[in-house]
Image (tube, helix red, strand yellow):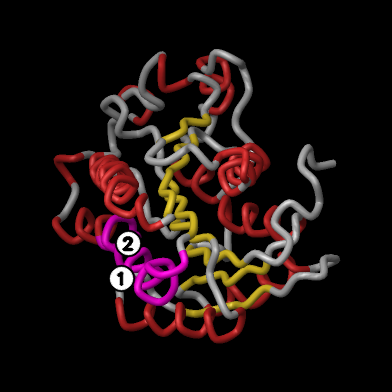
Amino acid sequence: MSIFRSDLLAGKVAFITGGGTGICKGIARGLALHGAHTAIVSRKADHVGPASQEIAAGTSTRSLPLVADVRQPDQIDAAVQQAVKEFGKIDYLINGAAGNFLCPAAQLSANGFGTVIDIDTKGTWHTTKAVFDAWMRDHGGVILNISATLQVGGTPMQIHASAAKAAIDAMTKNLAVEWGPLGIRTNAIAPGGIGDTEGARRLIPAGFMDRLVKSIPIRRIGEIEDCVNLTLFLFSEAARNINGAIIVTDGGHSLVGAYLNPEDLG
């Protein structure tokens, strides 16, 4: 049962990249359960079609599946225009498209590094600018970037993702200042480890989960619901004075050290 009113976001519209899987799919479902229509974007058609049905199921909302690659500005522009045509507006933008993998810096290729920057950092900018031009410049709105905590310290095997997320954090703060006067609030959430996601399965080594949980001050791994609740709060009027914030949701883990030690990875 949600701690928020079921009509908290009634009639609102959210545009969500990375909405076909994982954290952002869960967030999209949470928004729908609280009255918001959603447009979810993925470059994989086999993700967004079924996901959109699951997101809107049992609600009075609509979920629009859109196939686009955030690395391609023309594709994102077209997806944004389609969402505006379908719903008449975009109140919220969630930038959640991301790519990541474990790789020592010494073995990381230029292509590997560049691919993560292209998806995470450039993709966030391409989508943000498209939504700004199509709707938010004249009508305001709320932008939420999905960051991380990898860049808070030094996380082995994650130089590419750390650099990409650090850039997104900087973008969040810059846009909060530049676009705040236009009625646009820009924030980021920075999840730590979130269980039962593709990212956790790919990035947390086998047998390491118990040690990870014990290293978190509150002794629990994060859940998608934690990200959903934080998003609902930031999209609500209760957060109307929050702009330019990067809110960590990791149980205090980033305060006590890196997620991975080199010896854990072999």
Q: Residue at x 60, y 84 (%)?
A: 86
Give yes or no for contact between labels 2 and 1 (Cβ–Cβ under 8 Å). yes
Q: Residue at x 41, y 36 (%)?
A: 245
What amino acid type is highlighted by mark number 2? Answer: Ile
Q: How many marks?
A: 2
Q: Quadrant of the C terminus?
A: top left
Residue 85, image x and y in percent?
Answer: 55, 86
What amino acid type is highlighted by mark number 1? Answer: Arg
Residue 98, image x and y in percent?
Answer: 40, 56
Residue 83, image x and y in percent?
Answer: 54, 79
Among all residues in the image, which is located at the extreme front? 181
Q: Residue at x 70, y 56 (%)?
A: 9
Residue 71's mark? Answer: 1
| Residue 156 position (above or below residue 80) | above
Q: Secondary structure at mark 1?
A: loop
Question: Which one is nearer the viewer's eye here, 250 or 231?
Answer: 231
Q: Is residue 194 left or right of residue 72?
A: right
Q: Is residue 147 left or right of residue 194?
A: left
Q: Secondary structure at mark 2?
A: helix
